[in-house]
Amino acid sequence: MHTESTLDTTQADRTTLRPMRATDLPACHAMSLHLHWPHRLADWQFHHQVSSSWAVEQEQPDGTLNVAGSGMLCRLDDDYASLGLVIIADALQGRGLGRAMMQRLLADAGSRNVILNATEAGRPLYEKLGFVVTDTLSQHQSTMASAPATLPPGTHIRPLRPDEVPALLALDRQASGIDRSALLQALLKLAEVVVLERQGQVAGVAFQREFGRGRVIGPVIASNVEDAKALIAYWVNAYPGAYLRIDVPGRTGLKPWLQEIGLTCVDDVVSMCRGTPPKADPTWRTYSMINQALG
């Protein structure tokens, strides 16, 4: 059950941790712009739709209230949740609010294993809370990307058919080790999706949607790196000159190739897990993420 809690005055004077409301989202968006995050208000609204969300509310000396912190937890299935969009306003840094927010989100997770992607600034707190590093994640973006359109022999790329959605959800379960069906079904309302087909069989899939400063490519699922490159190249060439972003795990080995095709690496973070990391089917691999907050 969601309840408000007034935080101890030794942590932060006149602050309350409470469930986030839809009316809080413009203030959350403004906080993320202050941090130079690319999220649009629409991106915050989507995260709020699929997550358990909390806000830090600060009372000003004149009695007015403003949102001064945020955090969201997306319950992916009965075993896993993804945590992100944790922000504490600069004026309230160092008062224990980040830890209080994390403890609230972890309580929402219950017995679930929790995954997140952490900046170097956030990593020490997460490690103190029991998170361990499982991989790296590199963020690539550009308006100048250009990729060879060569497909592996015997393959072609086409739009996902509506009747293939159940198979897509099953494929993602294999590749991620998590049942993300509810999240992906919400994402399908916003995204374009293509399938890499080989001899009548699905050999990979790639989402693309509006996000941040332009468009984001992900998730991309394939059985090998060459198929993943073909799917990424498809979306790069479908939107020439567009602002494109893709976030790829280090274990995929895609970072050098993305640099070669003009998708510059602008940031590296670490992927972390509290509990047991998901175990994917080795036949399939997730080559790019939905985004950093959702995994």
Image (cartoon, rainbow, N blue to C red):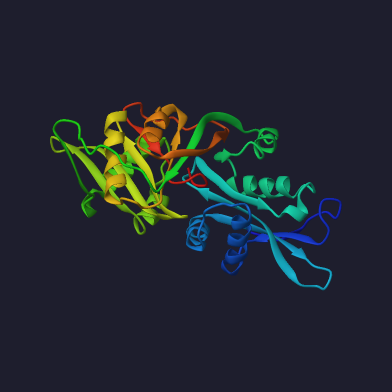
Q: Residue at x 68, y 60 (%)?
A: 18
The total number of labels drawn is: 0
Q: Residue at x 50, y 44 (%)?
A: 292
Q: Residue at x 36, y 53 (%)?
A: 242
Instruction: Give the camera-side residue of 97 and 183.
Output: 97
Q: Is residue 142 visible?
A: yes
- Where 284 sits versus 218, above or below? above
Q: Quadrant of residue 204?
A: top left
Judge from the rendering whether residue 226 lies leftward or rightward of residue 15; answer left or right: left
Residue 191 placement (x, y as % from top left): 34, 55
Judge from the rendering whether residue 250 lies leftward or rightward of residue 119; answer left or right: left
Residue 211 placement (x, y as % from top left): 44, 55
Instruction: Give the camera-side residue of 161 and 136.
Output: 136
Q: Residue at x 49, y 36 (%)?
A: 138
Q: Residue furthest right?
A: 10
Residue 198 placement (x, y as % from top left): 17, 35
Q: Is residue 224 visible?
A: no
Residue 209 placement (x, y as % from top left): 37, 54
Split into 4 quadrants, where in the image is the N terminus?
bottom right
